Amino acid sequence: MGDLHVIDHPLIQHKLTLMRRKETSTKNFRQLLDEISTLMAYEVLRDFPIHEVEIETPLERATGTAIDGKKVVFVSILRAGTGILDGMLKVVPVARVGHIGLYRQPKTLVAVEYYFKMPEDLAERDIVVVDPMLATGNTAIAAIDRIKEFEPKSIKFACLLTCPEGIDAMNRAHPDVPLYTAAVDRELDEHGYIRPGLGDAGDRIFGTK
């Protein structure tokens, strides 16, 4: 399974179960994804580099630790990635943000790029690519292929759900990229959907069909 991190905290699993229910409204689905993303950010950023800083408490001078949030870049794969992006920005509000627009061709499931916008100096930054679903892996792989052209310091991938097929595809294409997820579901069906899954994340986030 490579460098796979399944974040199985009870709060995350409880909220994920609520998201899976087909009767969950768009409003509640979006709110739950935002909450799960905030909780996941703590684990995704656990090993980020820190440095000492001198501060003044109300009582005395002290030494604390800090991360350089301005060196962190959250890259959202449009459109569904914005659902995870908002939650993670609550934890690191000074992080930079990049966007990659990709869609899967319905018949071939091949990822096609239509938008790419990144902060400057990616070579000095730590990247976290976010997308709710890692299904075939084609979209995530294409996004990471593009980002690697800029040789960033590090890349991680964070998603809500994945499956063995998606993990295998990512490991073969990018074995150096750690994968963070809330759950590994049973399988990928013939239409490229994760089973049991939760449906199309983008449609459920935005209330579209």
Image: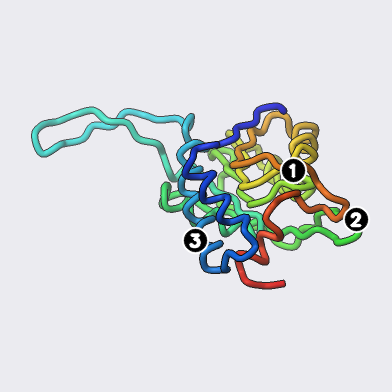
Given this view, does label 2 or label 3 mark the residue nearer the observer?
Answer: 3
Residue that numbered label 3 is attached to? 31
Q: Position of residue 171 (x, y in %)?
A: 75, 32
Quadrant of the frame with the N terminus: top right
Check the image and name the residue furthest to the bottom: 208
Q: Position of residue 91 (x, y in %)?
A: 41, 47
Residue that numbered label 2 is attached to? 108
Dot 2: few (<14), some (14–19), or many (≥20) neighbours within 10 Å?
Answer: few
Dot 1: few (<14), some (14–19), or many (≥20) neighbours within 10 Å?
Answer: few
Residue that numbered label 1 is attached to? 145
> In the image, what residue type sits under mark 2?
Thr
Query: What residue is drawn where x is 85% and y is 60%?
Result: 105
Report which quarter residue 106 is drawn in: bottom right
Given this view, does label 2 or label 1 mark the residue nearer the observer?
Answer: 2
Query: What residue is drawn where x is 90% and y is 55%?
Result: 108
Report which quarter residue 23 is drawn in: bottom right
Q: CA distance from mark 3 to mark 1?
A: 31 Å
> In the image, what residue type sits under mark 3?
Gln
